[in-house]
Image: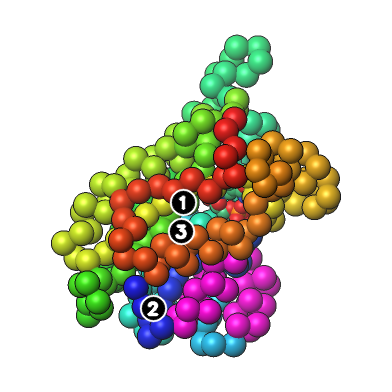
């Protein structure tokens, strides 16, 4: 799809994957709404692009906030692409990984699991459905296409690590709903895809360690290339999915053959 006369929405647009994707979509000629809570990084990115893209403070835990971001994109130009790639706040009161039971065999608060599913799955569906509603109003382009939505799964949705039950459930939910959403949206000429990344060097890894430390720990877990992924490799795939009308209804692994 040619998005050069359109707009795009990237939730988590100031993040590692998000900012790489924003740059790629802007290169394709779209005006991009950078939807995030990281105001400083988001504003700086919009300014750097200087192509009519804007930063909109957006909390993906709040439906009204998502609605404002979608509307902001539709006000710039017809919304053609939405890439859903946000993180979220940690579970309130969580002190460690959300194991099924702790090492002493005791259950953890169910609220931890619910929070993780809300951040990574419920909010992704909320963005998807709101973006689809806006895209449904667009004039169709070639092959009767009105828009495309890309969600972000994870290899944890296929094979999760200990302590990741909530995260794996959420990411498995993204994988599971992608074909169904593509079928729902097919009559409208809107595609739905998901990307399942392996281990990428984004801000999420840099809260407690340097780039070198993170690479030394995680790089060797990837068979080939033997390093963490570069966020632009995600951005490139997101851009290809937007461009290529025949990609629909599936989740693409992007992981250097990594399997946990
Ligand atoms: N980095 C990896 O290795 C990896 C692997 C698989 C999947 N993922 C997934 O990719 C997505 C993005 O992660 P990333 O690695 O780019 O992390 P990141 O920390 O670099 O970016 C996440 C962005 O989300 C934003 N955010 C946090 N709370 C928000 C909220 N309430 N509303 C809106 N935005 C909010 C942050 O400010 C940040 O800019 C997540 O869904 C993550 O699960 C990451």
Q: Residues within 10 Å of mark 1 (few under 14, many from 20)?
A: many
In terms of sequence position, does the residue under pointer 2 or pointer 3 come before the other? 2
Judging by the rendered image, the residue that carries numbered circle 1 is 195
Quarter of the image with the N terminus in it: bottom left
Q: How crowded is mark 2: few (under 14 residues within 10 Å), some or many (20 or more)?
A: many
Q: Do the residues labelled 2 and 3 touch (CB within 8 Å)?
A: no
Task: Give the colour scheme of this rendering.
Answer: rainbow
Of residue 95 and residue 243, the one placed in the foreground of this image is 243
* Front tag of 1 and 3: 1
Find numbered disc 3 in the image and state the secondary structure of the residue it sits on.
Answer: strand
Horizontal and vertical percent position of residue 201: 69, 52
Read off the magenta span: 20-49
Within 8 Å: ligand 1 and the Cβ of disc 2?
no
Find numbered disc 2 in the image and state the secondary structure of the residue it sits on.
Answer: loop
Judging by the rendered image, the residue that carries numbered circle 2 is 3
Is residue 172 in view from this perspective?
A: yes
Horizontal and vertical percent position of residue 203: 69, 55
């Amino acid at each position: 799809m040619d998005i050069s006369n359109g707009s795009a929405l990237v939730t988590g647009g100031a993040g590692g994957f998000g900012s790489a994707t924003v740059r790629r979509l802007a290169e394709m000629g779209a005006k991009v709404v950078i939807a995030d809570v990281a105001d400083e990084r988001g504003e700086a990115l919009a300014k750097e692009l200087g192509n009519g893209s804007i930063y909109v403070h957006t909390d993906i835990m709040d439906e009204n906030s998502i609605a404002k971001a979608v509307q902001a994109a539709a006000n710039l130009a017809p919304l053609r692409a939405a890439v859903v790639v946000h993180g979220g706040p940690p579970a309130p009161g969580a002190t460690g990984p959300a194991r099924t039971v702790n090492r002493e065999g005791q259950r953890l608060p169910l609220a931890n699991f619910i929070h993780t599913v809300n951040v990574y799955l419920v909010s992704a569906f909320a963005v998807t459905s709101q973006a689809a509603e806006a895209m449904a109003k667009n004039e169709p382009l070639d092959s009767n296409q009105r828009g495309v939505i890309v969600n972000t799964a994870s290899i944890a949705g296929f094979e999760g690590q200990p302590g990741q039950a909530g995260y794996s459930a959420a990411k498995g939910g993204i994988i599971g709903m992608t074909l169904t959403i593509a079928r729902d949206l097919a009559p409208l000429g809107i595609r739905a895809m998901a990307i399942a990344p392996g281990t990428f060097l984004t801000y999420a890894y840099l809260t407690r360690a340097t780039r070198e430390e993170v690479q030394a720990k995680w790089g060797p877990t990837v068979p080939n290339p033997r390093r963490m992924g570069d966020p632009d490799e995600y951005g490139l795939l997101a851009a290809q999915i937007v461009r290529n009308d025949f990609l629909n209804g599936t989740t693409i692994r992007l992981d250097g053959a990594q399997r946990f």
